[in-house]
Amino acid sequence: MTDYLDAAIEAARAAGELLCANFHEKLRVDAVFKHDIKLEIDVRTQTLITDHLLTRFPQHALYGEEGIVGDQSAEYQWIVDPLDGTVNYFYGIPHFCTSIALRRGDEMVAGVIYDPVRDEMWAGRRGEPPTLNGEPFRVSERSELSDAIISVGLSKTGQTIREGMPLLQDMVQRVRKCRLLGSAALDMAYVACGRFDAYVEQGISLWDIAAGWLLIEEAGGKVVLEPRADMKDKYMVVASSGRIDLNIR
């Protein structure tokens, strides 16, 4: 797994360089939705990551937000979100990242999340303590919900917003603070290293949370992922330190 993780780190750093070089520049918009934006830089960044990974491991496949490459039944599959926090990026908000995970069969075996603005690299392999810029980390030790900081995502559809709002209204009364920062992958990274105590979202894609899933579990936390029957390739996720009782109603 060392070669795989090193390759993911290199690809994430290269993606970060490209994103930072184009941050605050005039961006080409490929598509506009009610609650989302698609940018040309998303596609260009995934192409860069694909070239880095599949040139080195041509027998692998890649499943990304901007498309798939290779035989998706291959033993190893890279799961990539080249730019998580696209709306933040487009509006000049410096809170976005690149997320890269490697799945073998049904198990995530390696993952990185890179925030190029803060130069923070979360990295981990299955069975080993994950690191943030080379230093091991663990999930939060807080055990009281009243002390907790929770991220509640509202996703991108009217349905998930309607489902998420009651949860947000409930949580904001029960925890110290709720946060909505606009990057699911960074929310997962923040849970993994103890900045957040939990992250909850009603409709999320696998590429948003794949790397964070591994990082949280290897840092001692818990991730519950349930496929949505009414939304193709979307999941409900509750990621936490495992030390607080969310009692989500």
Image (cartoon, helix red, strand yellow):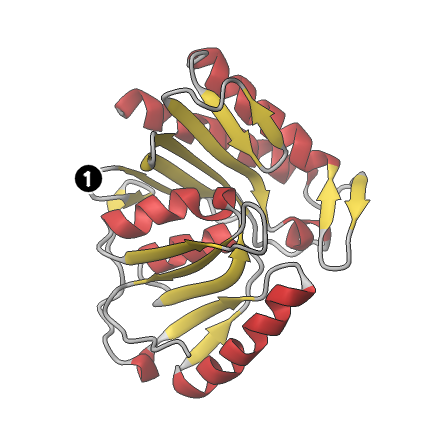
Identify the image quadrant of residue 175: bottom left
Q: Which residue lies furthest to the front in this view?
A: 229
Q: Where is residue 145 in the image (x, y as percent from the top left)?
A: 31, 80
Q: Where is residue 103 in the image (x, y as percent from the top left)?
A: 37, 32
User: Disc 1 marks which amino acid?
Assistant: Glu
The quarter in which the C terminus is drawn is: bottom left
The quarter in which the N terminus is drawn is: top left
- Relative to 118, 192 lies left or right: left
- Relative to 8, 243 lies left or right: left
Residue 26 visible, this orientation: no
Residue 175 visible, this orientation: yes
Q: Position of residue 206 (x, y in %)?
A: 48, 44
Identify the image quadrant of residue 104: top left
For this rendering, which residue is in front, 96 or 174? Answer: 174
- Relative to 59, 96 lies left or right: right
Q: In this view, does 5 lie above or below 224?
A: above
Check disc 1 and report its element: helix, strand or loop: loop
For this rendering, which residue is in front, 193 or 235? Answer: 235
